[in-house]
Image (cartoon, rainbow, N blue to C red):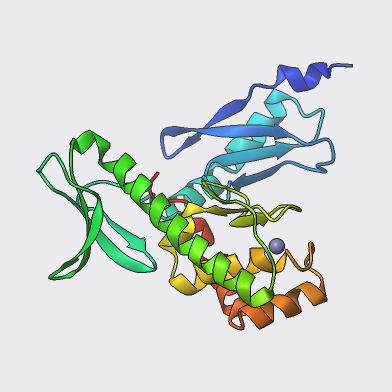
């Protein structure tokens, strides 16, 4: 039976934060016990989780009571880093300056600059962001494929297809058939983090779970796995702000 109260709620509500209306996405969760306001870990979008049956007026009151908290949290959030000329983005954990070259033709590439590596992009300025992302996806494919093959050889397992995506919830995955998928954003992280993710997914070819036995395989393939996990916990959500 359709839930009338649930349908009566809009998808989002506006809350006034320092004079600016901020949209808050509403999410009805039947098993939620109370209203919870948070910023999405990846997108930073304010989201209000509500138990079933909470009406609009109640939700609006809750949001206006928490407007100060929301404003503080939004202000503390690191700003997204766009792929634009003059922008500095990490590639393999090192800052790279995006330089747009006026020449119309030329492949996107990394060059040594006087103050550090430069990511050189050619062509129509309107296409710079797309070219940077395509370049990073290609680099991620190269690094992740090489790392996964190396770990697969060490583990004595076969691999299926390796695909690169823009996953939000997971950095990588391994199917029962041995197909691996990874987030292209791993190319932004220091190389040992990308290497660890490759080892993590390859180890699932030996154990399709996160049991003690599984982690023993990971430790054998990649002894620094704890350091890499800690890096991702600290910096992982920041990687999702790059290129948005
Ligand atoms: Zn896993």
Quarter the C terminus occupies: top left
Residue depicted at 18% across the width and 46% down the height: 106
Q: Which image quarter is the N terminus in? A: top right
Q: Is residue 75 visible?
A: yes
**Residue 229 at least partly seen:** no
Question: Which residue occupies 57% across, 78% down?
Answer: 227
Left or right: where does residue 105 sit relative to residue 163? left
- The location of residue 32, given as percent across then percent down, is 80, 42
Give the percent coordinates (x, y) of residue 13. Answer: 58, 27
**Foreground residue, 183 or 59?**
183
**Which residue is the extreme one toward the left?**
102
Residue at 71% from the left image edge and 30% from the top image edge: 58
**Vertical position of residue 214 compared to residue 163: above or below:** below
Q: In the image shown, does 243 or 180 lie closer to the viewer?
A: 180
**Where 60 falls versus 141 (above or below)?**
above
Number of numbered discs on residues = 0
x, y percentage for residue 61?
Answer: 65, 33
**Residue 203 falls in image quadrant:** bottom right
Location of residue 128 by image quarter: top left
Tell me: residue 37, above or below residue 212. Answer: above
Q: Is residue 85 left or right of residue 50?
A: left
Q: Quadrant of residue 122?
A: top left
Q: Residue 177 versus residue 204: which sits nearer the camera?
A: 177
Residue lying furthest right in this view?
Answer: 1
Residue 179 position (above or below residue 207) = above
Residue 188 lies left or right of residue 213; in this view the side is left
Q: For ligand 1, give the image quadrant.
A: bottom right
Percent coordinates x, y for residue 143 in the rendering: 45, 63
């Amino acid at each position: 039976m359709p839930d009338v109260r649930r349908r009566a709620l809009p998808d989002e509500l506006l809350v006034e934060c320092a004079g600016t209306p901020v949209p808050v996405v509403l999410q009805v969760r039947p098993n939620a016990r109370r209203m919870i306001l948070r910023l999405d870990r990846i997108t930073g979008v304010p989201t209000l989780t509500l138990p079933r049956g909470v009406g609009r007026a109640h939700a609006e009151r809750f949001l206006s009571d928490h407007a100060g908290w929301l404003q503080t949290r939004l202000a503390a959030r690191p700003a997204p880093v766009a792929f634009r000329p003059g922008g500095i983005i990490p590639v393999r954990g090192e800052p790279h300056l995006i330089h747009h070259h006026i020449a119309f033709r030329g492949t996107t590439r990394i060059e040594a600059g006087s103050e550090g590596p430069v990511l050189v992009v050619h062509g129509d300025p309107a296409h710079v962001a797309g070219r940077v992302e395509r370049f990073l996806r290609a680099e991620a494919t190269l690094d992740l494929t090489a790392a996964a093959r190396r770990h697969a050889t060490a583990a004595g397992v076969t691999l299926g297809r390796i695909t690169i995506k823009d996953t939000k919830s997971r950095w990588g995955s391994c199917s029962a058939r041995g197909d691996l998928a990874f987030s292209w954003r791993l190319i932004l992280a220091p190389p040992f983090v990308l290497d660890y993710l490759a080892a993590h997914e390859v180890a699932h070819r030996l154990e399709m779970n996160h049991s003690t036995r599984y982690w023993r395989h990971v430790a054998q393939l990649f002894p620094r796995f704890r350091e890499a996990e800690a890096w991702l916990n600290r910096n992982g959500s920041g990687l999702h702000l790059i290129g948005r």
